[in-house]
Image (tube, rainbow, N blue to C red):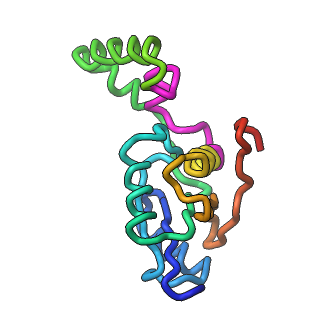
Amino acid sequence: MEENKKILMIIGMEKQLEQTICRAANIQPEDTLVLKSVFPDISQPYGDLMRDIITLVHRNKAEEIWIVRDKYEQTADESISDLLNRDKDLSDRMQTLEYLFQNCSPEFTQSSIDEWLSPSENVAEGVQKSVAAIRRHPLIPLHVKVKGFLIENSILTEIEALNKNGAR
């Protein structure tokens, strides 16, 4: 790797994932910047996670962004919205938010509160959506390469990106 070339890695919450990725890709930890994210997909193109990505890319002159997730990453058996709906007060608030999602489309990119709270159906799809969202963001420099990977048994596999229409 070129000297001073930085890679911003957006990874899951698993312990030791950063070290496993560095070994699998044969890169030095000091050449990486790491953001951890619970879900594999970026749900808001102008949310906090994207702001952190933009800030790190510009401050540290990152030349690549990698979204890397464990292929067998655990997904929740029960949706977050189901858990929140058990609480009466939160259930009422969720109905208010659902109204906003249905009627304030410019502010919300998802069509419902459940869609916003739930990750993609599978990890690869979430990574693909994140790669697409970062690539088309106007504040990410055009020279920055954005790639998606799945890791399985310490082997990194690049996954196919989605095109502008969301297809592979």
Q: Residue at left 55%, top 50%?
A: 134
Location of residue 126 by image quarter: top right
> Compared with residue 65, is residue 87 higher up or lower down, i.e. above or below?
above
The answer to whether residue 68 shows anywhere in this view is no
Q: Residue at left 48%, top 38%?
A: 43
Q: Residue at left 49%, top 70%?
A: 62
The picture places residue 46, in percent across and down from the top left corner, at 43, 40
Quarter of the image with the N terminus in it:
bottom right
Looking at the image, which is closer to me, 22 or 109?
Answer: 109
> Compared with residue 98, is residue 12 higher up or lower down, i.e. above or below?
below
Location of residue 70 by image quarter: bottom right
* 113 relative position to 72: left or right: left
Looking at the image, which is closer to me, 69 or 164?
Answer: 164
The picture places residue 27, in percent across and down from the top left corner, at 55, 82
Residue furthest bottom as drawn: 3
Q: Residue at left 39%, top 11%?
A: 99
* 88 relative position to 37: left or right: left
The picture places residue 117, in percent across and down from the top left corner, at 43, 31
Provide the residue span drawn in magenta: 108-125
Quarter of the image with the C terminus in it:
top right
Residue furthest left as drawn: 89
* 35 relative position to 67: left or right: left
| Magenta-span inclusion, residue 116 | yes
The picture places residue 154, in percent across and down from the top left corner, at 61, 73
Residue furthest right as drawn: 168
Looking at the image, which is closer to me, 143 or 28?
Answer: 143
* 41 relative position to 60: left or right: right
Total number of numbered discs in the rendering: 0
The answer to whether residue 42 shows anywhere in this view is yes
